[in-house]
Image: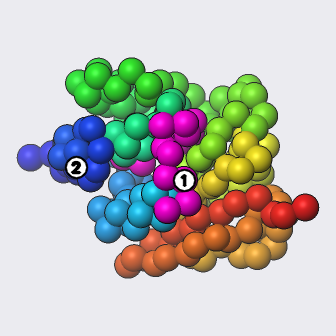
Amino acid sequence: MPRRIRIIGGAFRRSVIPVADAPGLRPSPDRVRVTVFDWLSHLRPDMARLRGLDLFAGTGALGFELASRGAHSVLLVEKDAVLHRALVDVKQRLGATQVHALRGDAFEIGAGLAPHAFDLIFLDPPFDSALMRPALALARRLLAPEGLVYAEAPDALADPDLQNSQLVQIRHGKAGRVHFHLLGLQPC
């Protein structure tokens, strides 16, 4: 039986998202998503105006959760063809018209997106890669002035990486082997 996760809140609450058997795919655990969306509901209570980007979408759990809670638009980017197809299938099944799924390299697609176009950016690159540092730099370029970046990593993000990207940590949590961070722009 294939693994699956459920959307936790909002219009699509309890909807199932299948988890493909793909190397390195590890959806954000339920308790992490609950915590992150609790943080977001306090910091950005009007989610209907948010424009979201899930740069390494995988299952799309974070992006679909944001859409379920009323985000204006959500862009999911996924390189793997099987995972991208699954994202499109979930979008269609849910009727999530505000969600768009693009297949391709996160950095190539990100380079073509307008600066400051997103209010919330999810970064969850493969843990066994060195993609977080360049992903933070890309997120900084794409982030709206009052925007937030959510980042998941196997270790706590280092201050030099955040400073180089002109981001500051707003919240940090740890669940098992996952460190999760909510980041914002450094004050001028």
Q: Is residue 139 magenta?
A: no
Between residue 77 and residue 70, name the one nearer to us: 70
Please, what is the three-letter code of the amino acid marked with disc 1?
Arg
Asked whether the viewer can see residue 108, the reply is no
Please, what is the three-letter code of the amino acid marked with disc 2?
Arg
Q: Residue 139 has which mark?
A: none
Q: Which image quarter is the C terminus in?
A: bottom right
Are the residues tagged 1 and 2 within 8 Å (C-beta)? no
For numbered disc 1, what is the local secondary structure? loop
Q: How many marks?
A: 2
For numbered disc 2, what is the local secondary structure? strand
**Residue topped by disc 2:** 6
Q: Residue at x 54, y 53 (%)?
A: 44
**Residue topped by disc 1:** 44
Q: What stretch is highlighted in magenta?
A: 42-63
Q: Does the magenta stretch include residue 43?
A: yes
User: Disc 1 and disc 2: Cα gap in Å?
Assistant: 23 Å
Q: Where, by quadrant of the figure, is residue 169 drawn?
A: bottom right
Give the answer, above or below, for where 119 lies relative to 75.
Answer: below
Counting other residues with Cα less than 10 Å from the Cα at mark 1, is it few (<14), some (14-19), or many (20 or more)?
some
How far across and how far down the image is residue 108, in percent? 69, 31
Between residue 187 and residue 61, name the one nearer to us: 187
Q: In the displayed image of the protein, which residue is found farthest to the right? A: 188
How far across and how far down the image is residue 14, in percent? 18, 46
Give the answer, above or below, for where 64 lies relative to 122.
Answer: above
Q: Residue at x 55, y 75 (%)?
A: 172
98 horizontally vs 21: left or right:
right
Q: Which residue is drawn at 40% across and 37% down?
A: 70
How far across and how far down the image is residue 34, in percent? 35, 63
Between residue 169 and residue 5, name the one nearer to us: 169
Give the answer, above or below, for where 141 lies relative to 112.
Answer: below
